[in-house]
Structure formats: structure tokens, C-alpha cells
């Protein structure tokens, strides 16, 4: 990479971390998971290490946390609150120890004793005690200056308000972590993404009475300023904290030797899912205070301590149950209900098991201890089972041979193309006979790429279904709005809005309509091919009479699998009725022969960001109907970049660099002589 590129890359990353910090520390609303944040931080530090000309006041190497919010009085810490360097692998620990040994100029046989303390993932606080009285409590803030949150901290029962022990220092800042127990978090999980956010939110309440409502705990582990502290070792200090009435982590240990640190790390990781508080690693501190003092700090982290972090995308937990979910096409998907565990900042309580074959192959059972992986946005899945931890009484999981929703037989179909049995087991009922399938069909019907009905999401569909307001797609257009208005959470305005958005979608293109029906194997592309073939709703509907199924095989892209699926769709009388009813209510537009010389001829388009009242799929159809082309990346070949709300910055920058015309939604519609 050349210097210019490195610099732009670095600046981009700094800008991003600044934004993430602001949302995290000032607004208590993290934009990304802790794992992703750590990743970015690491990338910045590596860039700085490899290119010593890179410097920024906003770099994580310069700042600890972020400035406190304006709601509370700012107070300087008497001794700075430091942060910790991270270790991920054994070699990081070896390096850490080597550096210490070198710094102290000891030979390699010198044994260092560490205090190994599970790192609670909460919010740190510094409590000032003078003559045994709790006088003031500060948040960490930027490490130098914190917020005065004394009154909020005083509501925490684990924080002693008066300590009369003779050996308690005259003046000391006791430091530790404020957190919420996982079992208590259960009551707040609708409001916060994870326990850490709940603790942070609670501590930042303006009114301490509100803090009291979210039960907080405090575990002590270090100190800042002190006068009269006797212990000479961290382990002795921890013992004293316990005597003075503070809670300390029950899993703290004193350990020497890297191998033993790793063994302890593995053991604690195994116990992680059973703890009632979130931990994201183990902190190792040189136990001897004298050595700590000699080692001192580099920038904002001590040389004498390091945080050995757990992998940000894997964790060990236990399978509490195996649920069977039923999809729109009747597929039975097993889902493991696991003991909730924090993986990279997200509390995970479900993991997909894919299908019956996967369960058999990995021999996954209820009660098993398993390693779960969460990578990016994909649903967490089970990597492996710890067979050693399996109880003798466990039994093999038997996949249901009856649909848990409607009781129909479940079958594994024979795939004519692959000449193999499907891995997926399905409910053999005909669509709407099975409640679960029906609900999923309705969710699909209103989904973004189908009817795209604003304000009619999955949860609302489920609610309306339970109240018997809807069963078939046509019911959506005949809703009893008077009844809905009386439901909890609804009012005349929200009902009006719903009515408006439903009515607005009564006009629909044939391809979207076919897609919305949710016929198995008929996705967006196939629906488009079919709509071009039939050109009108009537022709499509008549298929049940003409039974010209063989004809469909002539459509390029449609094969036997799709045809047999369309055949079974039309063989079902309920579907015929649904088509009939929808035909009466909707205006399904005929497909116009695509214009060869449309308004957008030879022009290519790409959309980035959210558009207003029009979906991407619709824009794509509009472009193609008018002889334009849609592309998926910004390149020299692109003529127009259409930008909506929150466009992808990279696309925008690339387009500017390549001098590509950037237009908004209105400008695009104007090209078609339309307005939004
Ligand atoms: S010692 C000088 N001990 O980790 C060391 N920190 O990244 C700094 N933490 O802000 C504090 N458990 O929020 C220490 N046993 C422990 C800890 C711990 C959790 C947190 C704390 C700190 C962060 C450092």
C-alpha cells in the first residue's frame, strides 16, 4: 500500500472509532458488538505500529474510553484509571512475560506470580473512602476525568457506605466493576442488547431512584489513590477487600507459569455459561506490588497487567432444549435453545442446527455442552459437542415424524435432480392446513420483496393470526380495523396508517404478486421469468384450467423442480380460492413488453441507502422496464448512483472519485417523468 492509501485508511478508521465511542460512551447505545469494536481498535493499533508517522488524538493508543456525558459533574481522578492491553493467544502471553522479565532484568528462571481474575464485562467505577466513609463515586470517563455518579452508586447494596475496620486505609479509592447479574438482566432484555449496556444505562440515570430499579452489583479488584494501604501483594489486597465487606470475584486465583495460566483460562471458559455474570476474559496482574511499581505504565496501560480475552465469536454453553421451527415451505428446522451466553457483545440464546442430518452427524443431544460460533450476521451455530461432559442418562435426539404444528406426517422428499433424499424433513400437509406454515406464508406475503406493506411486520402478523383476524392472504385486505383500533398498542392514528399502507399496495406487478404467493422454488428471479411468460394475472390463473405445465419448461431458467412445484400449487383448491379472492381485490398489472428503446436505454444504475416509499426491488423493475441496467458495484461502467438515506460511504466515495453522476430518488423518478 502506498503512503496516501495508508493515511486515508487510517483516517477512515479513526473517524469510525470516534463515532463508535460517541455512541457507546455518551449515548450508551453501541453501534457494533464489543468484538467488532476490539477488531477495529486492533487494526488501528497495528497500522500505527507499522507506520510510525500515523498519529491521532482520537486513537485508542491515546485515549481511554471517551469524555463523560454532560449530565453529571466532571471530576478528575486522583490517579488515572488505566486500561489493559489484550492478549488472545498463548504467544501473546509468552511475549508479555518475556517483556516483564527483560524489563526487570531477571533471568528466564525467575518465576512471576500472577493474580488471575476473571474480567467482568461491566462498567468500572472508582469509590473514594475517607476515614471509612464512602464519600464520592466516579465513573471512568476518559480515564483522567470521570463523572460524579455518587448518588447512583450509593444505591448499590454491594458498596459499603461505612467501613470501621482498623486496617482500612484513611484515604483510598477502591476500584471495581459495576454490573447486572444475568438472571436480573432477563427482566430488561427487551430494552438493552446485553447486560453491560443495562448496567451502563442504569448508572447514567439522572434520578438515583431509577438506578435503583435496575439491580446492580459491584465487585472490587484494584485501587487508585491510597494512603495507609498495608498489603504488599494483589492477592493479599483482594483478601482484605473481602474482610472490609466488598464482594470479590470467587474465581480469583494466584498462578505462575504460562501453561497454568492457560489451563485456568480453559477451565474458566468452560464455566462461563454457568456464571451469573458476563466475563470476557481473564486479567493477569503481577502479584507483587513492588514489582508492579517498578514496571510502571506505557501510555495508558500498565506493563504489569494484561487481559487474556475469550474469542469474540465462540463460546461454550449448554443445550437446554431442541425446538422445531416450521418454515413457509413446510421445512422443519431444528433450533437449539441454549443457556444464554454473551458472544462478542451479543447475548445468544438460540443456535441453528440446520437439519436432521446435521443433528445425526454431530450426534447433538439435549443437555449437551457445546461450542457455539457466531460469525458476522449469520445465525449462531454449533461447532462441536464436548462428549466428555455428556451425562450417562442422555439419549439420542429423535427427529419428529409428525409435524409439531398440525400433526401431519413429516417426509424427506426424493430429489429427482440430485437423485438423493433431501436433507430437510418437511410437513407433508398442503400449505394452509398447517397453522405454522400459514403464518409463515403470510409473513412472506407482506415481506419487503413481496407486497412490502409498511407497518405489517412479522410480530403483527403473528398477533393478528392469534386473534383470528387473518388466515389467508386476502384477509389482509379485509381487516376489521374497528377491532384493531381497540387492541392494546393501537390507536386511531396507527390504524389509519396501516389502512393507508395496505390500500396503497393493492396495485402490484405480476412478478411481485407471483413471488408473494410463496410457491416453493419460485424466488424473485423465477417469478420474474414466469410473469414475462404469462404477461397477465388471468393467464397465470388459468393455468389451473389449461394445465399447460409442460409449456413452462420452455422458459429459460425454469426446470422440472419448479414446474412440479407450480403443479402442486395449482392442485391445491385452497390456492385456487386464494388466487380467485386476491384477483377480485387487487389490481395486478400486466407485463408490458420490455421497451427496447426505453427512457433509460444503455444507462446503468446502482442504488445505495434506504429509499422513501419505494423498495430496491421496485426500482430495479422500473429500471429494467425502461431498458436500463442495474449493476451491483461501483465501477467505470456505472452511469448513475442513486442515493437514499444513509448511503454506503465507500460507494459514494468511489463514485465521486470516478466522476459518476450521483442522483437522489426524486431525480431518478424525474428521469422517468414520474414524481414520488
Ligand atoms: S484492573 C490497571 N481488574 O477491564 C488495570 N480491571 O480494560 C485496570 N476489568 O476498565 C483495571 N475486571 O473495567 C482490572 N479484575 C479486574 C477487572 C478489570 C474487569 C475491566 C475494567 C477496566 C478494564 C480494562
Image: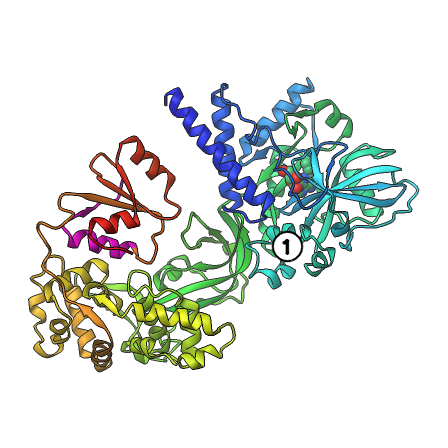
**Mark 1 — residue?**
275
- Residue at image location 73% in from the left, 27% down from the top: 292
Q: In the image, is 537 to the left or to the right of 178?
A: left
Q: In the image, is 513 to the left or to the right of 131?
A: left
Residue 276, image quadrant: bottom right
Q: Secondary structure at mark 1?
A: loop
Give percent across and percent down for residue 481: 40, 79
**Ligand 1 location (quadrant):** top right
Looking at the rendering, the stretch of residues picked out in magenta corresponds to 616-633
Q: Quadrant of the N terminus?
A: top left
Q: Nearer the viewer, residue 459 or 333?
A: 459
Q: In the image, is 250 to the left or to the right of 611?
A: right
Q: Quadrant of the C terminus?
A: bottom left
Give percent across and percent down for residue 433: 31, 80
- Residue at image location 14% in from the left, 61% down from the top: 558
Q: Is residue 162 above or below residue 43?
A: below
Amino acid at each position: 500500500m502506498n503512503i496516501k492509501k495508508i493515511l486515508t485508511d487510517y483516517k477512515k478508521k479513526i473517524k469510525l472509532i470516534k463515532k463508535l465511542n460517541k455512541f457507546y460512551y455518551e449515548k450508551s447505545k453501541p453501534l457494533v458488538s464489543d468484538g467488532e469494536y476490539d477488531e477495529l481498535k486492533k487494526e488501528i493499533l497495528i497500522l500505527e505500529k507499522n507506520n510510525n508517522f500515523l498519529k491521532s488524538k482520537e486513537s485508542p493508543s491515546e485515549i481511554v474510553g471517551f469524555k463523560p456525558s454532560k449530565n453529571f459533574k466532571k471530576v478528575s481522578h486522583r490517579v488515572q484509571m488505566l486500561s489493559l492491553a489484550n492478549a488472545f493467544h498463548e504467544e501473546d502471553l509468552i511475549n508479555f512475560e518475556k517483556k516483564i522479565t527483560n524489563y526487570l532484568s531477571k533471568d528466564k528462571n525467575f518465576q512471576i506470580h500472577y493474580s488471575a481474575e476473571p474480567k467482568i464485562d461491566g462498567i468500572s467505577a472508582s469509590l473514594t473512602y475517607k476515614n471509612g466513609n464512602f464519600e464520592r463515586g466516579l465513573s471512568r470517563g476518559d480515564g483522567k476525568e470521570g463523572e460524579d455518579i455518587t448518588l447512583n452508586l450509593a444505591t448499590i447494596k454491594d458498596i459499603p457506605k461505612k467501613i470501621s475496620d482498623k486496617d482500612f486505609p484513611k484515604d483510598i479509592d477502591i476500584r471495581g466493576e459495576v454490573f447486572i447479574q444475568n438472571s436480573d438482566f432477563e427482566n430488561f432484555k427487551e430494552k438493552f442488547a446485553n447486560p453491560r449496556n443495562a448496567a451502563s444505562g442504569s448508572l447514567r440515570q439522572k434520578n438515583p431512584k431509577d438506578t435503583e430499579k435496575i439491580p446492580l452489583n459491584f465487585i472490587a479488584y484494584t485501587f487508585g489513590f491510597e494512603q495507609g494501604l498495608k498489603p504488599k501483594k494483589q492477592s493479599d489486597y483482594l483478601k482484605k477487600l473481602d474482610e472490609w465487606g466488598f464482594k470479590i470475584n470467587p474465581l480469583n486465583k494466584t498462578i505462575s507459569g504460562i501453561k497454568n495460566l492457560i489451563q485456568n483460562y480453559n477451565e474458566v471458559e468452560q464455566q462461563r455459561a454457568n456464571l451469573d455474570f458476563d466475563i470476557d476474559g481473564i486479567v493477569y496482574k503481577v502479584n507483587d506490588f513492588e514489582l508492579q511499581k517498578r514496571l510502571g505504565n506505557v501510555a495508558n496501560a500498565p506493563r504489569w497487567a494484561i487481559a487474556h480475552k475469550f474469542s469474540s465469536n465462540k463460546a461454550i454453553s449448554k443445550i437446554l432444549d431442541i425446538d422445531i421451527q416450521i418454515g413457509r415451505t413446510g421445512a422443519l428446522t431444528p433450533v437449539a435453545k441454549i443457556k444464554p451466553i454473551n458472544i462478542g457483545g451479543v447475548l445468544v440464546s438460540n443456535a441453528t442446527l440446520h437439519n436432521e442430518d446435521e443433528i445425526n452427524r454431530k450426534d447433538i443431544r439435549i443437555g449437551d455442552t457445546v461450542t457455539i460460533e457466531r460469525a458476522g450476521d449469520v445465525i449462531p451455530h454449533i461447532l462441536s459437542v464436548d462428549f466428555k461432559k455428556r451425562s450417562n442418562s442422555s439419549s439420542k435426539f429423535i427427529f419428529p415424524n409428525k409435524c409439531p404444528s398440525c400433526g401431519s406426517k413429516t417426509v424427506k422428499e426424493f430429489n429427482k435432480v440430485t437423485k438423493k433424499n433431501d436433507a430437510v424433513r418437511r410437513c407433508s400437509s398442503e400449505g394452509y392446513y398447517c397453522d405454522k406454515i400459514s403464518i409463515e406464508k403470510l409473513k412472506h406475503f407482506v415481506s419487503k420483496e413481496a407486497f412490502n406493506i409498511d407497518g405489517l411486520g412479522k410480530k403483527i402478523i403473528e398477533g393478528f393470526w392469534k386473534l383470528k383476524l387473518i388466515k389467508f392472504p386476502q384477509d389482509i385486505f379485509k381487516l376489521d380495523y374497528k377491532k384493531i383500533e381497540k387492541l392494546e398498542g393501537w390507536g386511531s392514528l396507527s390504524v389509519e396508517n396501516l389502512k393507508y399502507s395496505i390500500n396503497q399496495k393493492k396495485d402490484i406487478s405480476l412478478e411481485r404478486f407471483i413471488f408473494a404467493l410463496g410457491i416453493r422454488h419460485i424466488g424473485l428471479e423465477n417469478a420474474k421469468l414466469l410473469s414475462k411468460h404469462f404477461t397477465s394475472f388471468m393467464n397465470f390463473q388459468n393455468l389451473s384450467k389449461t394445465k399447460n405445465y409442460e409449456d413452462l419448461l420452455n422458459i429459460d431458467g425454469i426446470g422440472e423442480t419448479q414446474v412440479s412445484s407450480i403443479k402442486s400449487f395449482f392442485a391445491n383448491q385452497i390456492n385456487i380460492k386464494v388466487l380467485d379472492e386476491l384477483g377480485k381485490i387487487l389490481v395486478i398489472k400486466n407485463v408490458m413488453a420490455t421497451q427496447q428503446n426505453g427512457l433509460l436505454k444503455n444507462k446503468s444504475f446502482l442504488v445505495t441507502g434506504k429509499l422513501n416509499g419505494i423498495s430496491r426491488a421496485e426500482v430495479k423493475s422500473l429500471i429494467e422496464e425502461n431498458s436500463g441496467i442495474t449493476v451491483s458495484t461501483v465501477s467505470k461502467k456505472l452511469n448513475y448512483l442513486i442515493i437514499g438515506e444513509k448511503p454506503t460511504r465507500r460507494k459514494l466515495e468511489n463514485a465521486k472519485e470516478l466522476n459518476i453522476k450521483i442522483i437522489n430518488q426524486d431525480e431518478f423518478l424525474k428521469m422517468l417523468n414520474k414524481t414520488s
